[in-house]
Amino acid sequence: MTSNKTTRRLLLSLFPLLVLVKPSSAYQRFLELIPNGGRVPSPCDGQPVWQGVGHITKDGGSQRNQFGIDFLSQGQTWTTELCEMDSDGDGRSNGEELGDPNCTWRQGAGPTQSDAVISHPGICEPVTSECCQRINSFLDCDGTRKLKCGHIQEDKTVKKELKLVRSPVPASETTYFCQVFDLDLDRDMHMVATEPMIDASQVVHHILMFGCDPRDTLDSRLKSPYPCEMVPHPSCRSLIGAWTLGSVGECAHPEAGFRMGPRGYRSVAIQVHWNNPKRLSGLQDSSGLLLHLTSQLRPNDAGMLVIGQRFMQIEPRSEYRQEPPASGVWGRKESAVDQGDADMSFSASCPGRCTKVMFTTPIYITAAVNHMHYPGKAQSIELYRNNTLIQKVTDQSGYDYDDPVFYNFASAIRVEPGDELRTTCVYKRTATPEPVCWGEATSDEMCFGFLTYFPLQSLSHPWCTSVKSLPSCDRHLPSLGRKPITGCRWWEFRNASQPETQQLMRQVFAKCYAGGKEALKCTDDCRKAAGLVAKHPCMQGDIGTYMVDRFKKGGGDTAKLFLDAVVSCSCRHFDYCDRKYKNGILGAEQEQFCPVPDSASSMRQSTVISLCAILSYLCHIWL
């Protein structure tokens, strides 16, 4: 099976799908947003720590208690109003319970005095009192939320554990570790449910399971844990299972399951994402998934389809915005549409011309989930037929990253070949000095819809996403691809070994890095070479955004130097999110090489011109 780097990076984003319950997540970061958040004891046994302070179970991942609801209503901020509330109705304010009786604590201040008596602001105490027992009808002191899935109880259902061999967790913020497992099944079975097996709960953020192409031979070294970055292996790219923080597992639709065995997946790869923002050392982990497999095959094999938008630039709120230079040449240029504090909306289409080729038969959607990050405010997925709205697959007006809604359809939604699937994501402006861009980290942003469906289709690329107005299917599907887009022969230009691209790159390096790769100089010859690239049809409009993204993600240091010279020395405007590169910004020296007019000088010049015009007019009248 062939693969490419776009495949690998897209699949990174697929971690929150297929969970067929409605959980919420208590991330460690929230404990730092309230006073003494990491010291709240369990009201059940007095032992620390009730990690999910805003949830009804101690580890979070459940519905919010009243304190969690009040905290959300205050914008997830410790305000005086929230401090003075008595969320759990036990006669003590939230501030008193969290050691901040005078409501003076501010985020970043750390814990209050060590001798402060901390109690739970979201659970009435003492829990044994008659009054509190009525208020705490939700309380689950055992904290044992189990997956409710009838498939698990069937006689022909068996369990199979897939866990990483215990491995050290690096003291790094983000790490992906993978391991390939042979299923060793002598007959076909359907995977109908999965449950998490979490070991190092303080760092495990999500677990993905990918099916491996049975036609490929995998290196035996992959059977031991190894760092895998974005995706386990090019041969293991079919996402078939997932756990994310707050989930209790997955339960498949009764009409379908994921086929494993001689005529299905024979090997799978488990990927564990460790999120270790505090860079803790000395941790080890052996997390994984518990598979529930049945020999009682369902009528259909299941599959997954990803739709959505892969470009966005969410501007900051006005009070946080850094004003760009007057010309907007090198900085962030804001259009009239972007100005102000209004919400920002981005849409994408999987058009009918694509689904007509992708689906050989109608498909039936059994589950769907929206996925954005923290700025996300609302998201919808709509099904159109002949440009007429047939049904809203999802419609979530109050999106909350920590409380995702998972849509199940007992009556599966029929999608015909030729139908269109539209995704719309709405975002709040951000409290950051720079825009938020599409990306793979939680601090970046996404706009995806994840659709579980049957029957499984033979898709070389199990997604239909867009970069701005350009659907990926126009490039991936053989019957649609290899057609120029606005004069750009994109399949050639994106290949650095293609003669035209190679010549352009050679000219840029020869003229702009004559003194070596560390010495970018925007000479006149360099400006000409960079300008030729910037004016190329493949660097214009939406296809230009796609092409810049391909160079950034697939070309390594050489591509970075090439783009840096083009952005710095062509003096052409590029959007901030086109220029963002990993931990830096392309064209950081553009201000030096493309100076903008001095605003005071421009104003003086304008004033002189205006005075001259007035005097000329007066002279004309008087004389």
Image: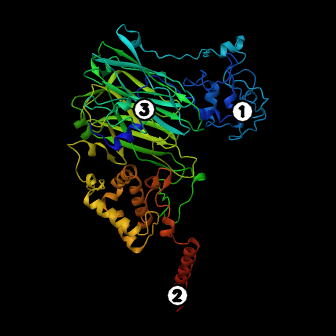
Please indicate, yes or no, whether residue 270 appears anywhere in the rendered image.
yes
Residue 378 rendering spot, x and y as whole percentages: 47, 37
Asked whether disc 1 touches disc 2, contact meaning CB atoms under 8 Å apart, the reply is: no
Check disc 2 and give the amino acid type.
Answer: Ile
Residue 584 rendering spot, x and y as whole percentages: 50, 54
| Disc on res. 621 | 2
Query: What's the CA distance linking mark 2 and mark 3?
Result: 84 Å
Check disc 1 and give the amino acid type.
Answer: Cys
Residue 266 lies in what quarter of the image?
top left
When the figure is inspected, residue 584 is found, relative to residue 296, above or below; the finding is below
Q: Is residue 150 left or right of residue 173?
A: left
Residue 520 rendering spot, x and y as whole percentages: 45, 66
Residue 25 rendering spot, x and y as whole percentages: 54, 29
Dot 2 falls on a residue whose secondary structure is helix
What residue does disc 3 label? 178
| Between 510 and 531, the one nearer to me in the picture | 510
N-term-proximal mark, 1 vs 3: 1
In the picture as drawn, the residue positioned furthest to the bottom comes out as: 623
